Image: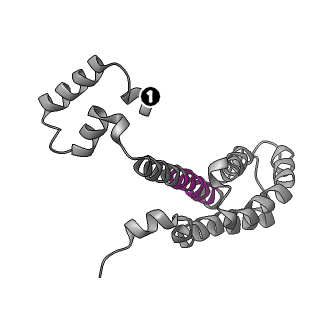
């Protein structure tokens, strides 16, 4: 972002004029300061922005995992044709394994569980004929897995907030 902000002076004045024209300079004074004096912004501010950006990335990926688990749980419980369940499990696994979620160690047991059971589920679906479906045992495993992911992610949400951000987000008494 700094590279974008540090481009030619012409571009900076054009952007400042545009913000002024829209009346946004009063709403976003910090953004206006960053645009007009990008070199004057302290390194600590840049670091805080980076921490917040990293935290938002983790939250987005965790939200993706929770939504995929919820969708898979709903599909297993309500749909009799499980043709795409193996694909959904693979996507859920890939979402759990992203670099952004490496610090979310509470997801590791679910990752291991998917690794242990995926081939069995895939083989069952492939060999079930016209209407692909999973066995009752696999269905129960998937329901437990997906509800466990959702419940654990929601309950562990506070633990993934970095200390620097937690100080800012704590409610005042």
Q: Is residue 17 magenta?
A: no
Whether residue 154 is situated above or below residue 1 in the rendered picture: below
Q: Residue at x 56, y 65 (%)?
A: 160
Question: Where is residue 125 shown, x and y percent of the image?
Answer: 80, 48
Q: Secondary structure at mark 1?
A: helix
Question: Where is residue 77 shown, x and y percent of the image?
Answer: 63, 61
Q: Residue at x 35, y 35 (%)?
A: 38
Q: Residue at x 12, y 36 (%)?
A: 23
Q: Nearer the viewer, residue 95 or 133?
A: 95
Residue most extreme to the bottom: 173
The answer to which quarter of the image holds residue 74 is bottom right
Whether residue 145 is situated above or below residue 28 in the rendered picture: below
Magenta stretch, main secondary structure, is helix
Question: Where is residue 63 shown, x and y percent of the image?
Answer: 53, 55
Q: Is residue 60 magenta?
A: yes
Question: Which portion, as a residue range, is magenta?
Answer: 58-75
Whether residue 60 is situated above or below residue 15 in the rendered picture: below
Q: Quadrant of the C terminus?
A: bottom left
Which residue is labeled 1 in the image? 3
Circle 1 packing at 10 Å, graded few (<14), some (14-19), many (20+), is: few
Q: Quadrant of the N terminus?
A: top left
């Amino acid at each position: 972002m700094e590279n974008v902000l540090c481009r030619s002076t012409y571009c900076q004045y054009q952007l400042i004029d545009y913000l002024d024209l829209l009346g946004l300079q009063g709403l976003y004074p910090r953004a206006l300061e960053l645009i007009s004096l990008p070199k004057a912004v302290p390194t600590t501010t840049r670091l805080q922005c980076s921490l917040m950006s990293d935290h938002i990335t983790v939250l987005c990926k965790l939200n993706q995992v929770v939504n995929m688990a919820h969708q898979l749980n709903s599909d297993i419980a309500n749909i009799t044709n499980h043709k795409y369940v193996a694909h959904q499990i693979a996507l859920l696994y890939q979402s759990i394994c992203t670099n952004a979620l490496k610090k979310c160690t509470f997801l590791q047991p679910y990752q291991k569980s998917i690794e242990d059971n995926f081939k069995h589920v895939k083989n069952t679906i492939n060999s079930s004929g016209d209407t692909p479906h999973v066995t009752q045992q696999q269905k129960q495993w998937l329901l437990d897995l997906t509800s466990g992911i959702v419940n654990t992610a929601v309950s562990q949400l506070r633990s993934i907030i970095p200390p620097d951000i937690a100080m800012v987000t704590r409610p005042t008494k």
